[in-house]
Image: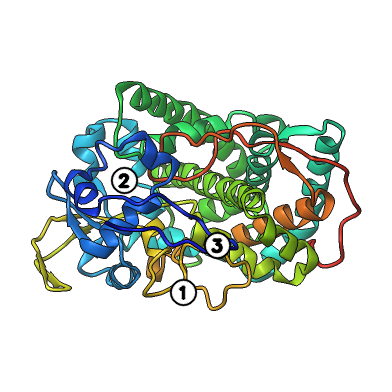
Amino acid sequence: MVTANRHSAGACSAPDIDAAAVISRFSLQDLPDSFYADPYPTYRALQSADPIHRMPDGSLFLTRHRDLEAIYKDTTRFSSDKRVEFAPKYGVGSLLFQHHTTSLVFNDPPLHTRVRRLIAGALNPRAIAEMEPALLALVDRLLDRMQSRGKVDLIADFAAAIPVEVIGNLLAVPHAERGPLRGWSLAILGALEPVLSPEIQQRGERAVVEFLDYLRDLVAGRRKHPGDPDQDVLTRLIQGEASGECLSEIELLHNCIFILNAGHETTTNLIGNGLELMLRFSDQRRRLTTDPALLKTAIEEFLRFESSNQLGNRRVVEDVEFEGVTLPKGTLITLCIGAANRDPDQFAEPDRLDIGRWPNRHLAFASGAHACAGLNLARLEGRIAIGRFLARFPDFTAAGPAPRPRRARFRGFSTLPVELAASRQPQEGMAS
């Protein structure tokens, strides 16, 4: 039997589970409802007894921190190119296949290198610092609006509203045209889940069609009237590199979709998960509101404890001997970030939420060449959103169930209803 760790403060407890039974039936294609509510007992069983687990379809499921880190760093033998994996899933002629095999995250060099360099250039430290005043103003407007209502949904009214505006500003999407972005993003990312129903696939295909139609007009307008490439990512992508190397039209359009999707969903989940953890662990909330200097380490702990993105994937490029296991060329690998971030070999008391934890070498943003290009922007959004919210509403309470969607790859909430209680003036140090 595998027994969950239990601690008096900041701990996440779970019932005892039969590790052998969990391992024998584990498959991403057939997950029980309990997994979506709390996957960590399952991860713990696999990590303890079968960290390189072969699933029924022949692919591998890895849960140890050291294994994920090694694979992230080895781009020669472990490929991010998803054409082989996604062809049977979506169909080679589908728009979902075209999108997910063209976007930055699911590619190897040279496309990955070219696109990442263009995006990263617009997300340098100076550019991110210049975003802070507008981000503070946005968050305060949302807080003012919520204060007048008392009972709110922290996802729709707050967490999801912030990254849509930030990424919309990066690409200079007109404010009046940002309404459909969240729906398109959820539909396209939902199609990445291990189980793809016809309804989810159709919704994703329709979202790609509508997104591409919108972006063609946006790109055409920006070609006629370029913005500042140091701040406008779309202008930067259109103009290409100083060497004259540019993205094709298809590469450009699909990587714009990727930027909006990646910047939106994971940051929404970071903010939502972080605030829910402050509801769940009142001792840690008191600790943070008493000592706002802990905000930066708190964000890292939220990312570790409830990783926005729980799963990644690689394909073995050549026969590999890995941790004593032979991996034939073509083997598909699922990297379980959520499990690696609770690995007791890397983190003391991994099931304990500790907002002062340091060092904290979590893998929420991946690692190596594929480390998230927008990680510092996401951190800034998380710090300002959660810090300003707690400074204004330190005594907020749950106001109903907070359901999680049936998604294994992305971990967040559908809704997070709360009562705000009385507001306070923001404390010094909780802004960012």
Crowding near the residue tagged with mark 1, few <14, some 14–19, many ≥20 C-alpha atoms within 10 Å: few
Query: In the orientation shown, which residue stands out farthest toward the bottom?
Result: 359
Q: On the image, numbered disc 2 is attached to which residue? A: 101
Residue 215 visible here: yes
Is the residue 13 above or below the residue 198 in the image? below
| Residue 71, picture quadrant | bottom left
Q: Amino acid at mark 2?
A: Thr
Please state if 145 lies on the left or on the right of 356 as rendered: right
Indicate which disc, 3 or 1, sits on the residue closer to the N terminus.
Answer: 1
Element assignment for label 2: loop
Query: In the orientation shown, which residue stands out farthest toward the right?
Result: 425
Element assignment for label 1: loop
Q: Residue at x 73, y 64 (%)?
A: 288
Cα–Cα span, label 2 and label 3 = 22 Å
| Residue 62, picture quadrant | bottom left
Indicate which disc, 2 or 3, sits on the residue closer to the N terminus.
Answer: 2
Q: Amino acid at mark 3?
A: Leu
Give the quarter of the figure containing the N terminus: bottom left
Q: Nearer the viewer, mark 2 or mark 3?
A: 3
x and y percentages locating residue 40 in the rendered image? 39, 53
Q: Are marks 2 and 3 in contact (CB under 8 Å)?
A: no
Residue nearer the viewer, 12 or 155: 12
Q: Amino acid at mark 1?
A: Ala
Residue 348 disc label: 1
Indicate which disc, 1 or 2, sits on the residue closer to the N terminus.
Answer: 2
x and y percentages locating residue 366 in the rendered image? 42, 63
Please state if 329 lies on the left or on the right of 60 as rendered: left
Q: On the image, numbered disc 3 is attached to which residue? A: 375
x and y percentages locating residue 224 in the rendered image? 62, 41
Q: Are marks 3 and 1 in contact (CB under 8 Å)?
A: no
